[in-house]
Amino acid sequence: GQQVMQIPQYQHVQEGEDFTTYCNSSTTLSNIQWYKQRPGGHPVFLIQLVKSGEVKKQKRLTFQFGEAKKNSSLHITATQTTDVGTYFCAGAVFVTGNTPLVFGKGTRLSVIA
Amino acid sequence: DAGITQSPRHKVTETGTPVTLRCHQTENHRYMYWYRQDPGHGLRLIHYSYGVKDTDKGEVSDGYSVSRSKTEDFLLTLESATSSQTSVYFCAIRGQPGNEQFFGPGTRLTVL
């Protein structure tokens, strides 16, 4: 079945450093979504990318969708302690309207002040 | 958060007992999902529903059943709880018109 691999599993950075997490799918995706989960919280939707090569920005966060629509990345510039949490990618392969998302295992980000 | 509640929020139970977790939504969403989250495994789909009485299995459905008799409620039942089912369980709905998911606050289940 479809798999979504996410690396790294953990990342520890000093506050102010940049951070990137990568997501790779075994199959071509219809779209990819990114979620953030704060410690003790629930996953919260950040963004969805649909087009090949798409780049979207949210303040210090930059999201990219690969040209082949099989990989994606999330880059955070100048991390802050508020960025702490686990970041998940989730891929959608359109088979029918019922086909569920497949989540990566997430990257846990720690930020040292 | 899209009007999703989960109950109970915490539960401790013993091996072999049945357990039912409830997900309730107030915004008439068609799609609902149950996930479990364990360290090192991320979010794994247990079952999902695409309408009243319409459900399907996810990646880790063994030992779980679901029911959806009303649009607003999606129930997850552990027929005979085992220690391997100790986990945090999240319910989610699919938003419209996009297919982003909105998660409930989670239920922490401990099976002794």
Image: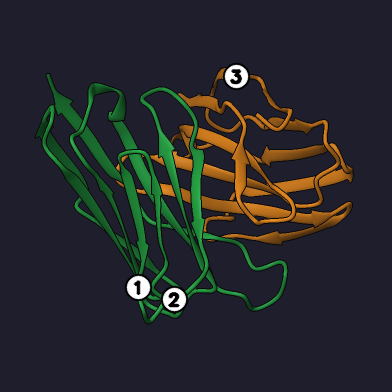
Chain colours: A green, B orange
Q: Which secondary structure lies at badge 3?
A: loop
Q: Which residue is mark 1?
A: A66
Q: Which residue type does callout 2 highlight?
A: Ser
Query: Do residues under tags 2 and 3 come within 8 Å of each other at their CB atoms?
Result: no
In the image, is A36 to the left or to the right of A11?
right
**Residue B92 drawn at (x, y percent):** 64, 42
Q: Write down the chain letter for disc 3.
A: B
Q: Which secondary structure lies at badge 1?
A: loop
Query: Do residues under tags 1 and 2 come within 8 Å of each other at their CB atoms?
Result: yes
Depth check: B100 or A8 in front?
A: B100
Marker count (numbered): 3
Q: Report the Cα–Cα distance between label 2 and label 3.
A: 40 Å
Could you say which quadrant of the image residue B48 lies in? bottom right
Q: Earlier in the sequence, mark 1 or mark 2?
A: 2
Q: Which residue type does callout 3 highlight?
A: Arg
**Residue B61 drawn at (x, y percent):** 59, 55
Q: Residue at x 18, y 35 (%)?
A: A78
Q: Residue at x 75, y 38 (%)?
A: B75
Q: Which secondary structure lies at badge 2?
A: loop
Q: Which residue is mark 2?
A: A52
Mark 3 Cα within 10 Å, few/some/many (few <14, many 20+)?
A: some
Q: Residue at x 80, y 45 (%)?
A: B29
Where the C terminus of chain A falls, by quadrant? top left
Q: Which residue is mark 3?
A: B9
Taking the image as drawn, is residue B84 in sight? Answer: no
Q: Which residue type does callout 1 highlight?
A: Gly
Taking the image as drawn, is residue A30 in sight? Answer: yes
Q: Write down the chain letter for disc 2.
A: A
In the image, is B19 to the left or to the right of B28?
left
User: Which is in the foreground here, disc 2 or disc 3?
Assistant: 2
